C-alpha cells in the first residue's frame, strides 16, 4: 500500500464515527440491539450498563471480532480503505502479552505488528516510561503483577498510534496513581483528535463524556437470561 | 508489509526457545517413537529396513501434530489473536507465518534427525535420502492441514484430541505419497519422481488453501 504513505496526512484524519441500529448476536441470541451513537473527533463515549448488558459485546463487535447482524458503522474521513478495526486499539480483559518475553520485547512486537498509517509513536522504552514501568522493561512479563501487566498492555496504545481507543474496563487492577496518569493520557489523546469508547463500571476520569446506556436501548425479549 | 511478519516469525522462535515453550518436544517425541518400534517388531533387519520409511513417516506425522494444537490456543487465551485480527496485516498471512515458524521449529529438526534414525532401522543410503526428501516435501502440508484443525479448536478447552481426530483422516494422501516416494527411492517399479511430485503438489495446495480455511475458522471462533 504505497499510496497511503505518500498521501498528505490531512486526508487521513478521522473526523467522525456514526453507528446506526447496531445488532450483535452471540450464540443465536441478540445481545446488543438498536444501538445508535455519533462521535466526533476528541469525544469520548462511556458505554454503561449492568453485567451482561452487552458492553463488551458491543466493543468486540466494533473491533471486528464479532460481525454485526444488523446496522452499520460509518467512518467520516480517516485512512482510505482502512476499517474501523485497523484504526483502533482494543484493550480488553486479556492483556495480549506473552509471559515468557520481556515487557520491552512484547511492546516492540506489537509496535511492529500494529503500526498504522498515523505514523510512528513512542519508542517501546518511552511508552514504558510513560506508564511508569521503565525499570522492569527487561523483566519477563510472567514476573509482573496484574496491575503492571495491565500498564504494559496500556503502553501499547502509545507505541502504535491509532485514533480510536476501544477500552473494556481499562482501569482494572490499576492503582490510584496509574489511574490518574491514564486519565491524563486519555485527555491528551482526545485533545489530539482521538476517539475513546470505554465500557466501565469504575469512573475513568473522562471529562464531558457522552453516555450510552445499554439497558435503556435494549428491549427485553421473552426467553432472555436475566 | 514484511516487517510485521518478520517480527511475528522472530517472536514465535523466541517463545519456543524460552522456558516451557516446548520447542524441542516434537523431535524428542519423534526420536522416542522411532526407537520404540524395533522393540515392538523384533530384531528382523530385513523387515525393519523394508517398513522403515513407513515407521519414520508415521512418527513424523504424529510428532508434527503433537504441538500443533497450541498453535493458536496460546494466542487465543492471552488475547494476542484479537490484536492480530485488528492489525492491517491479513490474518491469512499471520496464519502462514505462524505455520512457517512452527514448521521450522518442529519439522526441520525432524527431517535432519530422520536419516540418522533410519540407520538404526537398517535402511540403505538411497532410502535414507528418499525419506529425508519426502519429509521435506510433505511436512509443510501436514503443518498447514493441522493449522486448520488448530484454528477450529482454538476456542475450546482441551481441543487437542479433537483436532487430531479431525485432521488425521485428511492426512491420508500425504502419508500414502510420502511413504511411496520414500520407498521408491530405494528401488521398486515406480520411479521416484512420480509420487514425489504428487507430494509436492499436495504441499503447494495446502500452502494455497489452508491459510484461508484456518483464518476463516479463527474469525468464526466467537460468533
Image (cartoon, coloured by chain):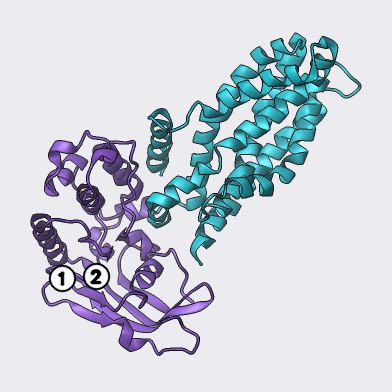
Question: Color used for chain B?
Answer: cyan
Q: Nearer the viewer, residue B195 or B176?
A: B176
User: Quarter holding the N terminus of chain B?
Assistant: top left
The residue identified by callout 1 is A203
The residue identified by callout 2 is A200
Horizontal side of B169 relative to A74 (left or right) equals right
The answer to whether residue A127 is above or below residue B37 is below
The answer to whether residue B99 is above or below residue A67 is above
Q: Residue at x 71, y 33 (%)?
A: B200
The x and y percentages for residue B168 are 70, 43
Density class for disc 2 (Cα within 10 Å; few <14, some 14-19, many ≥20) is: many
Q: Chain of mark 2?
A: A
Density class for disc 1 (Cα within 10 Å; few <14, some 14-19, many ≥20) is: few
* Total marks in image: 2
The x and y percentages for residue B171 are 72, 41
Q: Is residue A120 visible?
A: no
Q: Which mark is residue B6?
A: none
Picture quadrant where residue B122 is located? top right
Marks 2 and 1 in Cβ contact (< 8 Å)? yes
Picture quadrant where residue A109 is located? top left
Horizontal side of B223 relative to B37 (left or right) equals left
Please determine if labels 2 and 1 lie on a single subunit.
yes
Q: Residue at x 41, y 32 (%)?
A: B20
Q: Is residue A146 visible?
A: yes
Horizontal side of A103 relative to A203 (left or right) equals right
Q: Residue at x 20, y 61 (%)?
A: A171
Question: Color used for chain A?
Answer: purple
Amino acid at each position: 500500500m504505497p499510496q497511503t504513505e505518500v498521501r498528505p496526512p490531512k486526508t487521513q484524519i478521522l473526523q467522525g464515527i456514526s453507528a446506526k441500529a447496531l445488532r450483535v448476536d452471540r450464540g443465536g441470541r441478540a445481545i446488543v440491539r438498536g444501538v445508535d451513537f455519533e462521535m466526533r473527533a476528541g469525544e469520548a463515549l462511556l458505554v454503561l450498563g449492568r453485567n451482561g448488558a452487552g458492553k463488551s459485546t458491543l466493543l468486540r463487535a466494533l473491533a471486528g471480532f464479532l460481525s454485526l447482524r444488523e446496522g452499520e458503522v460509518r467512518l467520516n474521513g480517516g485512512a482510505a480503505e482502512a476499517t474501523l478495526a485497523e484504526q483502533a486499539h482494543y484493550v480488553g480483559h486479556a492483556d495480549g502479552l506473552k509471559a515468557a518475553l520481556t515487557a520491552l520485547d512484547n511492546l516492540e512486537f506489537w509496535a511492529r505488528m500494529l503500526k498504522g498509517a498515523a505514523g510512528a509513536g513512542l519508542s517501546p522504552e518511552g511508552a514504558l516510561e510513560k506508564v511508569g514501568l521503565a525499570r522492569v522493561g527487561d523483566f519477563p512479563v510472567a514476573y509482573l503483577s496484574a496491575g503492571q501487566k495491565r500498564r504494559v498492555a496500556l503502553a501499547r496504545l502509545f507505541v502504535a498510534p491509532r485514533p480510536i481507543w476501544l477500552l473494556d474496563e481499562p482501569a482494572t487492577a490499576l492503582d490510584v496513581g496509574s489511574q490518574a496518569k491514564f486519565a491524563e493520557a486519555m485527555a491528551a489523546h482526545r485533545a489530539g483528535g482521538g476517539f475513546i469508547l470505554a465500557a466501565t463500571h469504575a469512573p475513568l476520569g473522562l471529562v464531558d463524556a457522552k453516555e450510552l446506556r445499554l439497558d435503556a436501548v435494549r428491549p427485553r425479549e421473552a426467553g432472555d437470561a436475566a | 508489509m514484511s516487517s510485521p511478519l518478520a517480527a511475528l516469525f522472530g517472536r514465535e522462535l523466541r517463545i519456543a526457545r524460552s522456558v516451557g515453550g516446548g520447542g524441542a518436544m516434537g523431535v524428542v517425541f519423534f526420536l522416542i517413537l522411532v526407537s520404540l518400534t524395533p522393540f515392538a517388531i523384533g530384531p528382523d533387519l530385513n523387515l525393519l529396513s523394508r517398513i522403515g520409511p513407513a515407521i519414520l513417516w508415521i512418527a513424523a506425522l504424529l510428532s508434527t501434530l503433537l504441538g500443533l494444537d497450541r498453535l493458536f490456543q496460546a494466542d487465543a487465551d492471552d488475547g494476542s489473536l484479537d490484536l492480530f485480527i485488528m492489525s492491517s496485516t491479513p490474518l491469512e498471512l499471520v496464519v502462514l507465518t505462524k505455520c512457517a515458524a512452527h514448521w521450522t521449529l518442529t519439522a526441520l529438526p525432524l527431517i535432519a534427525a530422520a536419516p540418522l534414525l533410519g540407520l538404526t532401522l537398517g535402511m540403505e543410503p538411497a532410502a535414507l535420502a528418499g525419506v529425508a526428501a519426502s519429509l521435506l516435501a510433505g511436512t509443510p502440508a501436514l503443518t498447514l492441514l493441522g493449522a486448520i484443525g488448530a484454528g477450529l479448536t482454538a476456542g475450546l478447552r482441551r481441543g487437542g484430541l479433537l483436532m487430531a481426530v479431525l485432521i488425521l483422516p485428511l492426512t491420508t494422501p500425504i502419508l500414502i505419497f510420502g511413504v511411496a516416494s520414500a520407498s521408491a527411492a530405494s528401488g521398486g517399479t515406480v520411479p521416484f519422481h512420480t509420487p514425489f511430485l504428487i507430494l509436492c503438489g499436495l504441499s503447494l495446495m495446502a500452502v494455497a488453501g489452508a491459510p484461508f480455511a484456518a483464518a476463516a475458522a479463527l474469525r468464526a471462533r466467537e460468533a
